[in-house]
Amino acid sequence: MKTQTALLVVSLLAGGLSSIHRGTLRAQAWGLPDLSAESKACIECHRIDNAGVYQQWGRSKHHRANVGCFECHMSKEGEVDAYVHEGQWINTIVSPKDCARCHTREAGEFAHSHHSKGARILGSLDNVLAEVVEGNRGMITPAYPKGNSAAAVNGCWQCHGSEIKVLAGGKLDPATWPNTGIGRINPDGSEGSCSACHSRHSFSAEQARNPDNCGKCHMGPDHPQMEIYYESKHGIAFRAFKDKLNLDSSKWVVGEDYNLAPTCATCHMSATPARPATKTRAAVAGLPVSHDVGLRISWNNRPAISVRPEVSDKKMGLPGGDVNWETRRRTMQGVCMNCHEQQWVDNFYVQYDALIELYHEKFAKPGTALYDLAKPLLRPAEFSNELDWTWYEIWHHEGRRARHGASMMGPDYTHWHGTYEVAKHFYSKMIPELEHLVHTGRQSGDPKKTAAADALGTKIGEVLDSANHRWYLNKMDAAELKERQERQEEFRKRYGN
């Protein structure tokens, strides 16, 4: 029999869940009068068998609120992943739906974010690489008797999330668990993993606010936000003043609780204070904490050609589809204004937008058009052609690095790891590969390939003879050439000695 305390828990939590559907309950802080008998029973064994987990929980706010093992892991007969353990129905995975029993607002915001949709990459071009090109079907598990790619399981799925497969008795298939991917598809139908950021079982806000927490996924050759942040003035300040930022504060508001450096959470999620108008700037509205990390960005730099975030939100059916990029930018500018003055903020966005436009007009748009025209001349299997790899790395790796570098003020990633690499491979690899395809297509004797080669050759000529690329043909405008020669001569005179 459940104790009266446990019955109170069930009643409170069930009430919270029903209120989610009615849309009436906001986030609330509460504690139970005592630790339930069910959780006490859990502790009897787990404090010995899983001492680290017990100690983490013991230092958490959950412990101080008398929220224990059972309150989070409770289940009921008939749920997909439920099983009986020591006389109680429980499940292994604590999903966002479970967390929503108490953290209603946070779970709702997260459910509306791109983070929660991270596992939708499972059918994308990226996953073709991990499953087919890099991988095989050598990982045999009960849920995947025909095999699966260990490269995908240990790589892509650990950041983006796997689709959890439940076996008999509530056990979880080893190809899909353990997994704390941000977009994990849970047995109860919810998407996401709160523990991706709030690691169990301490669920520390301090840890979630630390940039290294985001760096588990936001790093590497195609999206090095972590490395860019640490290169930037923001990251330099964080490392210098980390111990003075009150990262463990319950109320963590920039300008009130800390002011020496921002973290990823500061800019993308955390609360800011309202500030009155002054002689030099307009009033700044305060922001609440948000678990939808996309509501303060004004470009989605994931695709080959960047799009406004409301466009991608609309494709996913997210409420953010109704929030335009101008609104999101003003929101982020409100964050910036807590440390920077208006001209600084305005001019930063002029620089950022100019880099996006440069990448789009000089490389992304013509590159996309050229690659599409080349497809009839390629082998049909993705990544079986050199051009597939060249173009993929130009936009997916180097182009993203340039765009992300500019967005977070990392000059080395913007230039040497970004636009330099884009230009180098566009001119030294992509154009020669395209010209080779034109040559072989015209020599093939196949009328369709000949026509495709002619269309591609015409487009190459148009691109290279445009203002952005004419230098490649040694056809730079005479006035510009003269100006550059004068500047080079001035440089030599200034520094020649």
Image (spheres, grey):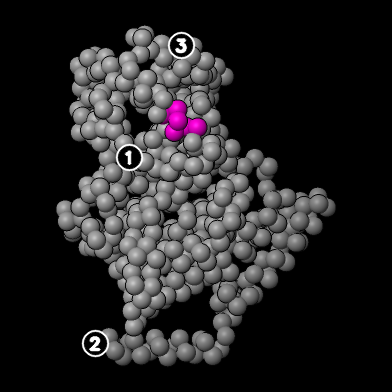
Q: Quadrant of the N terminus?
A: top left
- Camera-side residue of 280 and 137: 280
Pointer 3 residue: 169
Mark 1 crowdedness (10 Å alpha carbons): few <14, some 14-19, many ≥20: few
Q: Quadrant of the C terminus?
A: bottom left
Occupied quadrant, residue 15: top left
Whether the magenta-drawn stretch holds residue 16 is answered as yes
What secondary structure do most residues of the magenta stretch adopt? helix
- Picture coordinates of residue 187, whole percent (x, y): 50, 25
Whether the magenta-drawn stretch holds residue 394 is answered as no
Which type of secondary structure does the marked residue at label 3 adopt? Answer: helix
- Residue at 68% from the left image edge and 70% from the top image edge: 461
- Which of the two discs, 3 and 2, labels the residue nearer the N terminus? 3
Mark 3 crowdedness (10 Å alpha carbons): few <14, some 14-19, many ≥20: few
- Camera-side residue of 190 and 108: 108
- Residue at 27% from the left image edge and 53% from the top image edge: 252
Pointer 2 residue: 497
Pointer 1 residue: 29
Report the amino acid beneath label 1.
Ala
Above or below, 4 relative to 434: above
- Picture coordinates of residue 216, whole percent (x, y): 35, 43
Q: What residue span does the magenta drawing correspond to? A: 13-18
Q: Is residue 304 visible?
A: no
Please tell me whether mark 1 or mark 2 is closer to you in this view. Answer: 1
